[in-house]
Image (tube, rainbow, N blue to C red):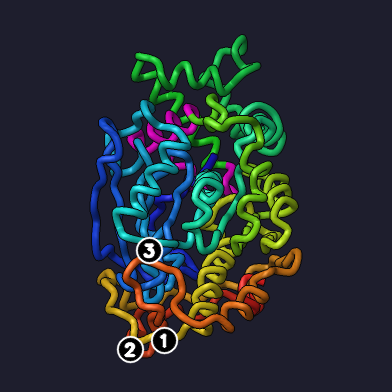
């Protein structure tokens, strides 16, 4: 599941300052669905697409802030039925492969050749499904809280497993379901979330969403739990999640993403995983890492599932910064284009707190070999159509209000390695 805190507001240590989009738009992707998207950062920069969680979580202002706005051209979109996309909470024509197709439509609409794909939780699921289908258009993957949507993963979180760790919140999750139906909680919820009784729908949507919000951090965050009391968000989140889960993610077979990861093992990949993630346990991140041994797996030992936990935030920003540094070192570039920052961005955020996690950098990366070979090549670099091979200069000397007070600590300067 997840992405429960995708639209959370407020300052988050280690992120770049708030920023406003330079473009918002909509795409009619089917007779039914209209997709909201936005772009922020540098219009001539390195494209990166942010893939939100859930499914059904939607994007929020803080999701723009993992990326250096002077280097990255950041594309965010609300998946079918989520956020500002319409119709709200609609399940018709809403499958994994519809969303993969939507990402391709966005890429083509924005005239982008290749982009970095960034996603966590369900966002990692969709990112992997997209990459395994369109590997030629993916420059790099930056993933968090890996979710393979396998039956064993769903059973652990929604039937028995996480319930052993959070029995207090589990009581609230099972409460709307009669005991006679609790042997199959996902299908019991699905019947109610898709039923005609709107009051039952809302009650179940709130209980479903609170379970995930309560379990998404190492320490239960009351503000995240309270998010489930927003009926508009909870209905989309619960209905769309449950729809995908009872349909096994619309995959051809259980475990498809891990089994077919060999198709993308050449793509430079970073995996950031909380050691105590109970929503998407490390079991799946480890399986993906075994299938992609050249990927860099970073285990944050004092974190759960949420991208909003300090150690995970720091490592995600760090991975994006390291890819930026690799491109700058290899390709150079002229001055960066101006960036539309929000009014509050004139104040610098607090520096990243050094959490007590001991990061584990598992396996060497092929990225250093890739860096050496690409430095020897002549000519332009594949990228967005019409983009000069000269990359934007990401020096922040001319825009100090967009500089974090200090980079997140704990990462080596080896590029994705």
Q: Mark 1 points at which residue?
A: 395
For label 1, the crowd category at 10 Å Cα-Cα, with few meaning under 14, some 14 to 19 and many 20 or more, is: some
Q: Label for residue 398?
A: 2
Is 222 within the magenta? Answer: yes
Foreground tag (3 vs 2)? 3
For label 3, the crowd category at 10 Å Cα-Cα, with few meaning under 14, some 14 to 19 and many 20 or more, is: many
Residue plotted at (45% across, 49% down) = 52
Q: Is mark 2 on a helix, strand or loop?
A: loop
Q: Position of residue 248 (x, y in %)?
A: 57, 29
Which quarter of the rendering shows the N terminus?
Answer: top right
**Which residues are the magenta region?**
215-243
Residue plotted at (63% across, 80% down) = 372
For the question of whether residue 276 can be seen, the reply is: no
For label 2, the crowd category at 10 Å Cα-Cα, with few meaning under 14, some 14 to 19 and many 20 or more, is: few
Q: In which quarter of the image is residue 336?
A: bottom left
Name of the residue lying farthest toward the front: 378
Q: In which quarter of the image is residue 408?
A: bottom right
Q: Earlier in the sequence, mark 3 or mark 2?
A: 3
Name of the residue lying farthest toward the bottom: 397
Q: Is residue 79 above or below residue 196?
A: below
User: Which SS does the magenta portion mostly show?
Assistant: helix
Q: What element carries label 3?
A: strand
Task: Assess whether mark 1 and mark 3 are in contact (beta carbons under 8 angstroms).
Answer: no
Is residue 319 or residue 48 the one in the foreground? Answer: 48
Q: Mark 3 points at which residue?
A: 74
Q: Is mark 1 on a helix, strand or loop?
A: loop
Alpha carbons under labels 3 and 2: distance apart: 20 Å
Task: Assess whether mark 1 and mark 2 are in contact (beta carbons under 8 angstroms).
Answer: yes
Residue plotted at (44% across, 62% down) = 114
């Amino acid at each position: 599941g997840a992405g429960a805190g995708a639209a959370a507001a407020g300052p988050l240590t280690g992120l770049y300052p708030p920023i406003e989009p330079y473009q918002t738009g909509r795409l009619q992707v089917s007779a039914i669905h209209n997709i909201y998207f936005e772009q922020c950062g540098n219009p001539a920069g390195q494209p990166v697409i942010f893939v939100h969680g859930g499914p059904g979580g939607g994007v929020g202002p803080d999701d723009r802030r993992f990326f250096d706005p002077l280097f990255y051209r950041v594309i965010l979109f609300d998946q079918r039925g989520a956020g500002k996309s319409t119709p709200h909470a609609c399940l018709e024509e809403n499958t994994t492969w519809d969303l993969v197709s939507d990402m391709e439509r966005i890429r083509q609409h924005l005239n982008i050749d290749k982009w970095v794909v960034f996603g966590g939780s369900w966002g990692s699921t969709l990112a992997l499904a997209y990459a395994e289908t369109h590997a030629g258009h993916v420059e790099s993957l930056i993933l968090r809280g890996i979710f393979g949507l396998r039956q064993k993963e769903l059973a652990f979180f929604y039937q028995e497993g996480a319930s052993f760790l959070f029995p207090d919140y589990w009581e609230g999750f099972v409460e709307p379901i009669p005991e006679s139906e609790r042997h199959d909680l996902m299908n019991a919820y699905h019947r109610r979330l898709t039923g005609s009784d709107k009051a039952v729908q809302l009650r179940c949507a709130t209980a479903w969403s609170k379970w995930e919000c309560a379990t998404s951090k190492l320490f239960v965050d009351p503000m995240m739990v309270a998010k489930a009391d927003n009926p508009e968000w909870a209905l989309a989140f619960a209905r769309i999640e449950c729809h995908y889960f009872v349909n096994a993610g619309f995959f051809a077979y259980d475990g498809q993403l891990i089994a077919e990861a060999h198709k993308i093992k050449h793509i430079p990949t970073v995996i950031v995983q909380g050691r105590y993630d109970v929503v998407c346990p490390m079991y799946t991140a480890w399986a993906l890492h075994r299938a992609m041994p050249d990927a860099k797996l970073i285990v944050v030992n004092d974190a759960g599932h949420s991208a909003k936990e300090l150690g995970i935030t720091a490592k995600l920003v760090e991975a994006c910064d390291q890819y930026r540094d690799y491109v700058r070192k290899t390709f150079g570039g002229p001055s960066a284009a101006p960036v539309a920052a929000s009014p509050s961005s004139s104040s610098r955020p607090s520096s990243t707190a050094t959490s007590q996690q001991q990061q584990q950098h598992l396996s060497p990366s092929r990225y250093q070999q890739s860096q050496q070979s690409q430095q020897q090549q002549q000519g332009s670099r594949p990228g967005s159509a019409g983009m000069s091979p000269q990359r934007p200069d990401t020096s922040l000397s001319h825009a100090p209000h967009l500089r974090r007070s200090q980079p997140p600590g704990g990462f080596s300067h080896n590029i994705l390695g």
